[in-house]
Amino acid sequence: MREFRLYNTLTRSVEPFAPADGKTVRIYSCGPTVYNPAHLGNFRTFLFVDLLRRALRLHGWRVHQVMNLTDVDDKIIRRAAEQGKTISEVTEPVAEIFFQDRDYLRIEPAEEYPKATDYVPQMVALVARLIEKGIAYKAEDGSVYFAIDRFPSYGRLSRLDRREIKTGARVAQDDYSKENAQDFALWKAAKPEDERARAAWDSPWGRGRPGWHLECSAMAIDLLGETLDIHCGGIDLIFPHHEDEIAQSEAATGRPFSRFWCHGAFLLTEGAKMAKRIGNVTTVKDMRESRIQAAAVRRFVFNTHYRKELNLTEEALEASIDAVLRIGIFAERLRGATSGTPALGQAADQLTQDVESALFDDLNAPEAIAALSVFITRANAELDRRGNDADALAKARAAFERVNGVLDVVPDAVVDSTLASWVEGQLEARKAARARRDFATADRIRAELEERDVMIEDTPSGTKWRVAR
Ligand code: AMP
Ligand code: ZN
């Protein structure tokens, strides 16, 4: 079997990866903070994790992934206070939307979705362990802090300069910058607004609530053990979230918390201007309402390497809508074909080989997509030849299924919606061209439509179209 290579933020290099037990990859991925429906940026990260788990499975390993739902933190309590609600009244409907959006985007469900509020006893136990070791202390404000100068490797993941660490100073909020590298809160003494929002629990240090970083450490250790194979999330989580997770976990257990740390780059939506056809899309709900299929979103996200920033632009989305339409039409053709040629079998072997070498080399999805496109061109040409090699056809189907099992980029109902909206757009453009007597453009559009088996007919009541197959 080919080696699987993955970039590890801990070492800042691409390293060979295999699960510690040789069989099952234990992944912890930081999940959504459920106070607002996740935006497409969040989903870029969740799609990256989906790609990771599917690629690991393609390699032959099993995957046990835990993705938490952060259902208590500063932001949630603030939202609950604004709306006069309890935290669970804020988080439950949002969690529901998260799962619907996940399914819409065809993100494979993780094996477990623990909610932070269900793990408070484990969090309390972890804090007690740290206090026992003299690494955590209760301060005069009633909260318990982690003493970062008692953990000499603090800052290793984010490459924090030790001189930047302010000893003795404390930070209570969940999120802070590197300039505020100081003792952080593990357990926060309850304030009246926490009690009102039902975000307070009993502990040996009085009523309080867990800090955000503590939540992930406690759930990861409880569900996956003291050393994970892979811990992942978006790049913004490196500091302080993951740095603090490492500190708490390793100080308590004395073992490495995770062998690999993997981070996805950001989706930039700022300045994303969409014209009418696409509308302004920042959530999955917007995507759905604009009738942008999951296949197109996946193709758009995967067409840029996960460690590169990605801009959400109308052009890129349009290009992906067109690209998956081609893939969908091909998928139908392959399904309906009755036989192939030996060269089709060779193209299938090449596809498998190229996609594996791309994905197993630090999840190079753009290269896998390019290989798929080359395959479709070759396979279409071979299918035109109408050979009689049934084995080659079977091989082509199997290879295509295997690759699509990772990328999952075949649109559903090609003819119903994706094709229809594309055709309508083309017909609009053709009508406009004819109106300005630009017949060359009008003919070119007709030819493009025919190339995709779309036959058109101009009638007194407008242009009619149908798919000839
Ligand atoms: P949150 O719900 O804020 O805890 O974020 C959930 C996940 O989305 C985390 O892994 C973040 O790193 C990630 N994330 C947040 N914003 C973006 C973005 N613009 N692009 C990619 N990932 C993001
Ligand atoms: Zn986390």
Image (tube, rainbow, N blue to C red):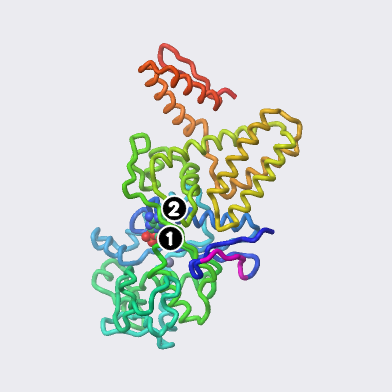
Is residue 399 a member of the stretch shown in magenta? no
* Residue assigned mark 2: 44
* Image quadrant, ligand 2: bottom left
Q: Is residue 382 visible?
A: yes
Residue 132, image x, y percentages: 42, 88
What element does badge 1 sit on? strand
Q: Which mark is residue 234?
A: 1
Picture layout, residue 283 above or below residue 191: above
Neighbour class for label 1 at 10 Å: few (<14), some, many (≥20)? many
Mark 1 near ligand 1 (CB under 8 Å)?
A: yes
Between residues 359 and 286, which one lies in front from this camera angle?
A: 359
| Identity of the residue drawn at 63% across and 44% down | 401
Three-letter code for the amino acid on which mark 2 is drawn: Arg
Picture layout, residue 107 above or below residue 344: below
> Which residue lies most toward the top here?
460
Residue 5, image x, y percentages: 59, 61
Residue 282, image x, y percentages: 36, 47
Q: Which mark is residue 153?
A: none
Q: Which residues are magenta?
A: 13-20
Picture layout, residue 124 above or below residue 236: below
Query: Which quadrant would residue 186 be assigned to in this image?
Result: bottom left
Between residues 78 and 374, which one lies in front from this camera angle?
A: 374
Pointer 1 with pointer 2, Cβ within 8 A: yes
Q: CA distance from mark 1 to mark 2?
A: 9 Å
Mark 2 near ligand 1 (CB under 8 Å)?
A: yes
| Identity of the residue drawn at 49% across and 31% down | 419
Q: Left of 18 or right of it: where is 391?
A: right
Three-letter code for the amino acid on which mark 1 is drawn: Gly
